[in-house]
Amino acid sequence: MIPKQEIIDAATRYGLLPNIVEKDYVLGWLLAGISNHDAFRETWVFKGGTCLKKCFFETYRFSEDLDFTLKDEAHIDADFLTDAFGEIGDWIYDQSGIAIPRDGLRFDVFENPRGNPSCQGRVSYQGPISPTKGGLPRVKLDLTADEHLVLDPVTSSVFHPYSDEPDAGISLMSYAYEEAFSEKIRALGERTRPRDLYDVVNLYRLTDARPPAATLLNVLRAKCEFKEIAVPTITAIERHRDAVEAAWEQMLRHQLPVLPPVAVFWNELPAFFDWLMGAAAPAALAPVPRSAGDALIRERRLNLGVGFQAESAMEVIRFAAANRLRIDIDYTKLNGERTQRRIEPYSLRRSQAGDILLHGFDVQRQEIRSYRVERINSASAAGESFTPRYEIELTSTGALPIRDNPPREERALRVHTSPVRRRSIRRSSTGPTHIYECSYCGKRFRRKARNSKLNKHNDKSGYPCPGRTGFYVDTKY
């Protein structure tokens, strides 16, 4: 398990509470466990807001639930899920040190509005900063087996920006980006919650990842037809405005460093629906003029080598850019003088001389300026929205759009290459479980076979343990 300080440092970078970051960390390992379980690897398809955050756009709102469409309805069984997640919990503890107690697993099966079984699960966990007494934090799972998959699922890499990321990475089956986008539009029309409004507008803003409107509309129509609901319209959604505005802060504030004004998102909906129904998209903005030799930096993960302060500032800047918020920066000039500037962030580039430069519009000076990133002492979102003057190039490159109805063999070309998997979890719900304790650090491991040899692991403080053998403690039947 990673040290507690890593969670605290990440929370500082993201401007969030540590418990929100810890949950994001645990979500990554739960996704790793699910994708490595023999029963789930090819039959569970990841979707929803957490999928957008963990698979497509790392600079996005933090999410807290895991949503899956299941290809095998037989998996919606409380006993089966309890056994399987018990195995997953053992594997996660073995790999990361995160405890998933079996008595903290709960799965409630119910009949959905179409008369078919669905399930809500609760998975408790003990992470780096979780309380040792009282109730443990939990992750909610929403599982359904009767969703209509319009497009073939893709194999997606999972963002896990923590020091214990598996060497081979984490990957699993997820909705195609176009289907994930369409699901958010459907949800906006069907339940109209603040996070649906936030997601739809943000996905529309990401022009480099925006699918053709006709493709999106075709997928949306198929999904709405399956649900027996009308395709959402701006008129139908508008009547929920008061309720969304009232719940905006309560439902979103803890997931974002700074909460953008809800009015800005409502004001973009008409343009989005016009585009979806066939109107021309707004003309693309020109990028900030580029100096000779400048190279655009747009990687999903920014390992700039400019120090913790500057890296933390860039997390805030990327978030503010994605949410159209001006930022205040504390900046050290070449003469050593510190100054405060309010800017609209647009682009990150490496100059021909090797300097990493943030390009932004200086609100006081009313002109484009560049700022050397290593001289940025701090940055904060000002809570003041802006209408872009130039193309915003600070969001990471997103998913590639597909054409209408491409051939299956061509569609396969857009699937990410799956990394080599770590040891799989093989389902074995019957028989005894043998418990071994590391003779060095005291950490316990569950085994289906009698085997005292231990894999590399961290001790209870999150540091590598030299112990490689354990002694037998007990057998559970």
Image (cartoon, rainbow, N blue to C red):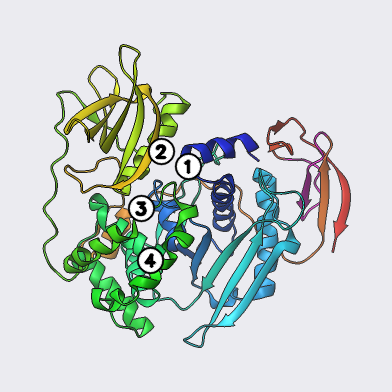
Are the two marked residues, 2 and 1, in contact with CB atoms closer than 8 angstroms?
A: yes
The reply to whether discs 3 and 4 touch (Cβ–Cβ < 8 Å) is no
Of the numbered discs in the image, which one, if any, rests on residue 260? 3
> CA–CA distance between discs 4 and 2?
27 Å
Find disc 1 in the rendering and name its residue: 15
75 versus 164 height, above or below: below
Please name which of the two marks, 2 or 3, marks the residue nearer to the observer: 3
**Numbered circle sitting on residue 310:** none
Would residue 289 appear left or right of 100 to someone viewing this image?
Answer: left
**Residue type at the position of mark 4:** Glu
Residue depicted at x 73% and y 36%: 459
**In terms of image quadrants, where is residue 288?**
top left
Q: Residue at x 32, y 58 (%)?
A: 412
Q: Position of residue 266 (x, y in %)?
A: 28, 64
Q: Amino acid at mark 1?
A: Gly
Q: Residues within 10 Å of mark 1 (few under 14, many from 20)?
A: many
| Mark 3 to mark 1 CA distance (whole Å) | 14 Å
Q: Nearer the viewer, residue 224 or 9?
A: 9
